[in-house]
Amino acid sequence: SSKPPGPYPLAFFARAIEGFRRGLGLDRLALVGHSMGGAVAAAYALAYPSRVECLALVGGVVPGFDYRVSWVYRLLAAPGLGELIGGVMWPGLLRAALSRCFAEPRREEVDFLVRTGYPIRVSPEGRAAFLSTLRSVRADFITEGDRYRRALASLSPPVLLIHGRQDRVVPPVHPQTVAGHLPRAQLRWLQRCGHFPQIEWRDAVNEWLADFVASTWTRSRRGS
């Protein structure tokens, strides 16, 4: 997709999802967000609550719950420094970073992420959009955290959180705190799993998501 210059806060992505929903003529959505996608899903649910059937956060992170961005991302978020680091990124560095995201990294899975992610990150417009997203979303976490925490306490759609016990990117204490704060949340753990449950335990994750969406949809149609 195009990557126009400018800020990319969570509200930008929420509006993009809403435009997608309208374009397809859908009434309500079941949203699944991985990593920062969890924050995007939460932002959409708060901005367009009547359009959300249910939410699933897979290794997700949400503003307002004491999540601290890793030192690598803090460096990338620094003006000038992020451009410098991004300008010297090579496949080996990205491969090493992605390997740490897995509890038991497999070469074919890491290589796939490098092949699909590296060209985007090294193109000038892709690198600019990545850094802009990182900086904008980090600012949201700092300035909007309290608002998100208060608003999510009254979130009505059911929420499923799926998280790896060995996640180094979003520590397991984060989904525990989030689940305890939401009125209709359930948390499911995966052992020997890092930050990519949908890859490391794809069959289990797909089954849980399918059951969650189907049961939510059934209860909604029954009016319960």
Image: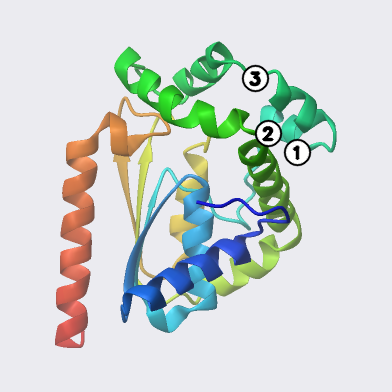
Q: Is residue 63 above or below residue 122?
A: below
Alpha-carbon neighbours of circle 2 within 10 Å: few (<14), some, or many (≥20)? Answer: some
| Mark 1 crowd level (few <14, some 14–19, many ≥20, 10 Å Cα) | many
Number of on-image labels = 3
Instruction: Single out the residue that lies furthest toward the bottom.
Output: 223
Task: Please identify, in this view, whether the residue under mark 3 or under mark 2 is nearer the observer.
Answer: 3
The reply to whether dot 1 and dot 2 touch (C-beta < 8 Å) is yes
Q: For the point 24% across and 43% down, which residue is it? A: 205
**Mark 3, residues whose alpha carbon is within 10 Å: few (<14), some, or many (≥20)?**
few
Residue type of the residue flagged with mark 1: Ala
Q: Is residue 176 visible?
A: yes
What is the CA distance from the residue labelled 3 to the residue labelled 1?
15 Å
Q: Which residue is the site of mark 2?
A: 73
Q: Which residue corresponds to mark 3?
A: 89
Q: Give 60 or 27, whichever is nearer the viewer.
A: 27
User: Label 3's element?
Assistant: loop
For residue 77, the mark is 1
Asked if residue 86 lies left or right of residue 201, the reply is right
How far apart marks 1 and 2 lie (CA) works out to 6 Å
The reply to whether residue 153 is in sight is no
In which image quadrant can residue 160 be found?
Answer: bottom left
Dots 3, 1 in contact, CB < 8 A: no
Q: Is residue 79 left or right of residue 209?
A: right
* Residue 122 position by quadrant: top right
Residue at x 38%, y 18% (from the top left corner): 111
Percent coordinates x, y for residue 168 in the rendering: 51, 28
Of mark 3 and mark 2, the one earlier in the sequence is 2
Quarter holding the C terminus is: bottom left
Q: Secondary structure at mark 2?
A: helix
State left or right for residue 39 relative to residue 85. left
Q: Quadrant of residue 77?
A: top right
